[in-house]
Amino acid sequence: MSENPAAYPCSGHSSRLIDLGAAGLSGLCIMHCLALPILAGFLPLVGTISDNHLIHQMMALTAVPLSLFAVLLRQKTGRERAFFPLILAGLGFLLLGAFIEAVEDYERLLTVTGALLIATGHVLRLRRHS
């Protein structure tokens, strides 16, 4: 079955770049959550900056439109919709960890889990389109 390129607002190449960008952003998020605390033990200034809650919120707010745009861009068939729940769950975890104070003790776990779900969804979509 061939896809009709005119049915999508962006070319397949653009869609792949968006998925790669979204997966890369998730990777940066994971590195931020896991690597910076280790660095913080060696560089106190980095620890102060990396623990800033505003950074987590800005990264989450950046991930939401990028991921949703990438997913909704090519969601014309059932095969395309298969990854939407995975990415949506990841975004939910990111937003929960970044903005809900009641789960502050689990913020890192929620953020890493969310970023992994988002990255997995985008990589799986990318592999399906390749």
Image (cartoon, grey):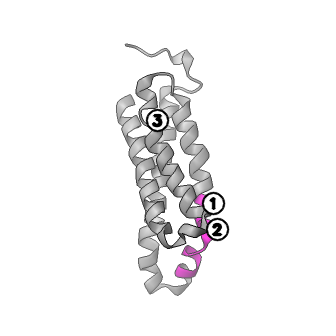
| Helix, strand or loop at mark 1 | helix
- The answer to whether mark 2 and mark 3 are in CB contact below 8 A is no
Can you say whether 6 is above or below 112 in the image? above
Which numbered tag is attached to residue 16?
A: 3
The amino acid at mark 3 is Arg
Of labels 2 and 3, the one closer to you: 2
The region drawn magenta spans 47-59
- The answer to whether mark 1 and mark 2 are in CB contact below 8 A is yes
Q: Locate residue 105, reporting x and y percent.
A: 50, 73
| Residue 21 at least partly seen | no
Q: Locate residue 38, reporting x and y percent.
A: 41, 78
User: Along the line of sight, which residue is nearer the eye, 94 or 6?
Assistant: 94
Q: Residue at x 56, y 16 (%)?
A: 6
Q: Residue at x 60, y 69 (%)?
A: 101
Residue identified by numbered label 1:
58
Left or right of 56 on screen, residue 38 = left
Q: Is residue 49 magenta?
A: yes
